[in-house]
Image (spheres, rainbow, N blue to C red):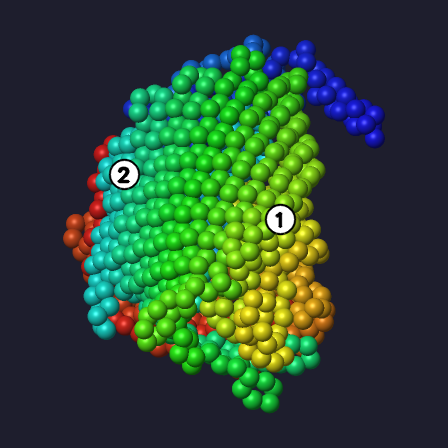
Amino acid sequence: MKRIALVIISMTIGWATYGQEVIKSKVYGRLVDKTDGPMLIGATVQLFNIKDSTKSRYAVTDVEGIFLIKDVESAFYKMNIKSLGYKPYSRTVRISIEEMNFGNIFMEQDEKVLEGIEVQGAVVAMEVKGDTVQYNADAYKVNPDASTADLVKKMPGIVIDENGVSANGETVEQVLLDGKRFFGQDPLLSLNTIPAEVVQKVEVFDQKSERSQFTGYDDGNTTKTMNVVTKEGKRNGQFGKAYAGYGTDDRYKIGANVNSFKDDQRLTVIGMTNNINQQNFSGEDLAGISGGGGGFRRGNNSLMTGTQSGITQTNSLGLNFTDEWGTKAKFEGSYFFNQTNNSRDETTNREIYNGDSIQYYDEIKNADTDNLNHRLDARITYDINDDNKLTIRPRISYQNNESLTFTDGATVNGAGTEINRTENNYRSSNEAFNIDNYISYMHKFDKIGRTWSLELETNYKETDRENYYEDIAQDSITQYLTDETDYTIESTLGYTEPIGNTAQLSATYELSYRERNSDKNTYNINPDSGAKNFNTQLSNHFVSGYTQHKTEVSLSNRSMGTFYRFGLAYQYAELANKQIQPETGNFVNRFNSILPFAMGRIELGSEADVFIRYRTSTSTPSINQLQNVIDNSNPLFISTGNPELDQSYSHSLMIRFNKPNPDKNRSIANFTRVETTQNYITNETTYAPQDSVYAGGIIVQQGAQVSKPINMNGYWNVNNNTTHSILIEKLKSNFNTSLGFNYRRLPGRTNEQTNISSTYSGNIKFALASNFSENFDFNIYYDVSSNLVNNSIESIANTNYTTQTTGAKLNWIFGGGFVFRNDIYYQKYNGIEDSFDSEYVLWNMSVARKFLKNDVGELELSVFDLLGQNQSFSQSVNPAYVEEVRTEVLQQYFMMTFTYQLRRFSGAK
């Protein structure tokens, strides 16, 4: 086996070094406006090999107008340069030396484009530049008040829905503004903050890691990124909007969004206060303090309005600031604050499958929750010189959550006889503090491709919980006090070495340590005297330490439109768990893991490409899963931990095919992911046949369930998504289709029997977006998804349900400043039982009048939920039960709103 491996490595290195005699050149220069000298960003520079077109190369200019093309073979080339708003540039050049600097190349403006003369087909809607898809904003028509979110919805392959922002089936994780971070990693907030009128181009690509960007070695760690490039004339000035509205039932909204740009220094301020469920923060602002019992449920907290659960009052403030200090230092930072109060009434209907019998659990819940969050993050880069770079990325967050919940629930059998009941009040106070810091130092040697890097990341998180559970029926009060700390330190040392002209070798060593400490103390409180008694059975102090050593070696090669990388990592890990109370105990597990990985990208012609990535990884159980303490905050659903859990080992395969066709304004893409996990952490659930005593003397009512995490093999998850986008010439509209499929195989145990739950899901989406007028803008969409669930032993739990969603949005400007807006959303749900079926129409409508100079003022009369049908319901399915949850939502109201648009630019053309 070793001989075979040596032969393969020798052949690979030999092939990679073949042809070292050929001169490889580095070609670079800068594109400058001939008239007034600004740099051209996002322009395409192509070197077309006259004798062999397969050796053609291209690049895109950066934010400073610079293009750089490496590894160009000696030959005669046709240099073609294209930039929106400028005349094409073309010349024949000879590449014959190792480094060719073309200096400043002056581009001449295309007066026809600049004067606004519309020429059919003059604006290229979409371009492909390597692994970047670029959309030209001028090719997509939106109303004058549109945001960038409204703009990108019209672009082929880009979808914005309740799940966030996606491009060709992949989730967009961050949005950049002219190549710089904008409000951290909150894509929807970023896109809704930027007005569409300042956008020149939108680029979608996989941003490489800090190390990959500096060393040139692709380590496979990427972030799906959308970069918004602003227009040259919109980069200096102030713009934004402010609004205030008041309506029936004392509904109100006040907010502002102000941007101040001056070259590289940019400041954005956003703020809002309202009681109509508008929120402009993401789920990460509520993360970190969930848990602790009491039926806490997390939902999607993206920019949604009205359809969120309960009634929410929001106060929020956000700041984003970027600047360049001299020629070497760059700063990017953001601060966000939000405060919410949510009140909700919730009804839960659950069907519980216990062997061949069914139990029914019905619950009514009233909850009031206050949440407070501060989040601060920054990124500082210092280019010491051309060969050395320092990056610092700190992040701090603080969260406080106070809630009071009343729950009344009961379980009955198939004959309708009540088995158990709970009636309780639950009060919780949770506080969390988190600080994270990333530091990297990277160095390039004189030899191109030889680098070393050192990365260090630390994280400290502290969570305090104080919860009170009052059992009304038993006339008892229980206090839960939990203190948790989580500390991680991780360091990575990397080295890269070039092999020939196209290959590169990489070696890394990673050392990390994580310690989690959870101290849970429970007290029984006398309702009359207030005296406290320590409850040993429900208390536990647990410490978990995880040490990891990881060594990795890999080889990459890039040549002739093909890139591949493969390697192997060895990981040694030790999971040391220590229980301090109520009984002492030590549990130590050691893991030796071989982690192979491979990735490759093949260009199929000038536009299409296929990307394949295979990787393996391990995952450790959480502190809550490890801690052997009983949580009976809901006595009908008791849970406990398992200190003997092992780490899981996963295989992941991803295949992505992308074929944009700019000439025909269409694109097709396919995204497939397959995952399987050994030692997957799932649940073992047991139902009490009668009132019984659980370990530690805890009384379990008849029909109540007790669950704990266990390791099982056999987990699979398969996803496939195909998107197709075309321009319908007759309608002058863009038509997007999406076809998705998901298969999930989830192992578990119920009443000491192994159950395999297999879920098959299919999804079809259609969307039609107008693209013929700024004054008449519409979007029509239809989405249907179907789910089939099969269980190996709980056949009675097999289910089939379908969700259909249809919607239409219209913005119509007419009559010299009048605006009509219409937004209709219809959802129909067919559940497992007829009682689970539901459908409703949410219809919002408004009329407005623009006034003041340049129509910067607007007065709008709107109605929310015109038909009074707004609902909120959801369904979840697992091997043990299915449930439907219905929640109180915002009801019909009318509102009058005044909006003022701020537009003050300098240097606009």
Identify the element where label 2 is drawn: strand
Mark yes or no: residue 612 visible.
no
Q: Position of residue 663 (x, y in %)?
A: 54, 41
Identify the element where label 1 is drawn: strand
Kindly report the distance in space between the C-alpha atoms of the residues bearing marks 1 and 2: 52 Å
Q: Is residue 130 left or right of residue 391?
A: right
Q: Is disc 2 surrounded by few (<14), some (14 to 19) or many (20+) residues within 10 Å?
A: some
The three-letter amino acid code for the residue at tag 1 is Phe
Task: Read off the residue under disc 2.
Answer: 267
Q: In which quarter of the image is residue 565?
A: top right
Task: Read off the residue under disc 1.
Answer: 587
Residue at (59%, 51%) from the top-left corner? 585
Q: Is disc 1 surrounded by few (<14), some (14 to 19) or many (20+) residues within 10 Å?
A: few
Q: Nearer the viewer, residue 560 or 720?
A: 720
Is residue 141 depicted above or below 435 in this figure?
below
Residue at (60%, 54%) from the top-left corner? 643
Q: Position of residue 115 (x, y in %)?
A: 31, 37
